[in-house]
Amino acid sequence: MRNNSISNFSRANAARRYAEMVLSEFIAKDLRGEIGEKKYNKLKYSEVLSKIRGAITPELKSALEKIKVIGDKGSHYSRHEKPTKREVDSAIKIASEDLIPLTLHNYFSKNGFFSIEYGPKIFSTLPPSIRESVLRRLIDFRSKKLIAESNLDKNLLHRYVMACHKSGNREKIRRRLRELKSKSRIDGDMYRALERTISNFDENSHKLPIPKTMEDSNRNFNAVLSSLDYYHLKNNNELISIIKTFLHGYSASEMGNLQENVLLYNEYIEFEKI
């Protein structure tokens, strides 16, 4: 899909095929189970999207539609409509960089972030930038309602802050926290607690197995899965499958001297190190 040496037609088609795989295996999984494999396989891409329209987030639906439009140009002959490099690059970016985070956002929107035990821990093995992308979509920053009204809200915001910081956006998240405090979306106690968390992280970051590459993420993913029993693996099967698709093709790096089970703690939340 990322091979620039092949034609725009082939790259556009590859983006569409990848999107169809994600759509079939994860996004439209319930529909496939409801109508059966035989009937599902007869449906066109557009028909599947139409049938699940109300069951997926608008952003995910839009991404799938964009890939389809460009992918169609690569799949069907037309003397007048040919995929341009710019269009194909856009489809490739959406398919390779945006589709899995949007699928994860859709998954958590449907199931809840903390509803399945060990789900957040499995999710935490992903690169910080991916976690930041998913978590910011789960938090309603525009609402006038106070974010930190429950421990779950606090934990979700806390994870977003840490993912943003680990992505190299320390000052960006500090500005966001000041903005939230000025708008009374978080109170002074929560603001100070999160600021302390950022400082604590700065002091301990060299010990933590923060994934800097996809290989590091695969390392952390394998480490977490190996610590879970059959029951918890089964309960998180859909989430595990989505992440496995994202990490496919990357070998796992070594843990080395990094501390696998370090926990940092503040008065609000105990959170995991990955």
Image (cartoon, helix red, strand yellow):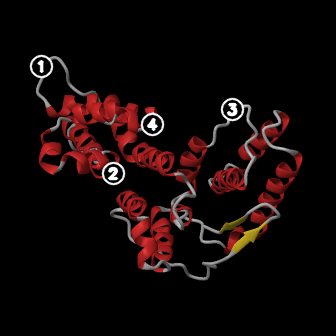
Q: Amino acid at mark 4?
A: Thr
The residue shown at (44%, 32%) is 58
Residues tagged 1 and 4 counted as in contact (Cβ below 8 A)? no
Specify which label sits upstream in the sequence, 3 or 2. Answer: 2
Instruction: Give x and y (percent) for residue 16.
Output: 25, 40
Does 113 sit left or right of 106 as displayed? Answer: right
When asked about the image quadrant of residue 76, the answer is top left
**Is residue 172 rendered to the left or right of residue 17?**
right
Instruction: Tell me where residue 39 appears, x and y as whole percent.
Output: 14, 43
Q: Nearer the viewer, residue 46 or 68?
A: 46
Secondary structure of residue under mark 4: loop
Q: Amino acid at mark 2?
A: Phe
Which mark identifies residue 195?
Answer: none
Q: Residue at x 21, y 39 (%)?
A: 13
**Left or right of 220: which side holds 9?**
left
Query: What type is the residue that disc 3 sits on?
Result: Ser
N-terminal of the two: label 2 or label 4? 2
Q: Which residue is mark 1?
A: 79
Counting residues from the N terminus, which is met first, the one under dot 4 or under dot 3? Answer: 4
Amino acid on which disc 1 is placed: Arg
List the residue tagged with mark 4. Answer: 57
**Spatial separation of the CA atoms under disc 3 and disc 2:** 30 Å
The residue pinned by badge 3 equals 143
The quadrant holding residue 236 is bottom left
Label 2, label 4: how far apart the Cα atoms are: 14 Å
Which residue lies under the disc numbered 2? 26
Residue 71 appears in view = yes
Q: Residues within 10 Å of mark 4 (few under 14, many from 20)?
A: some
Mark 3 lies on a secondary structure that is loop
Q: Give the CA distance from mark 4 to mark 3.
A: 18 Å
Q: Nearer the viewer, mark 3 or mark 1?
A: 3
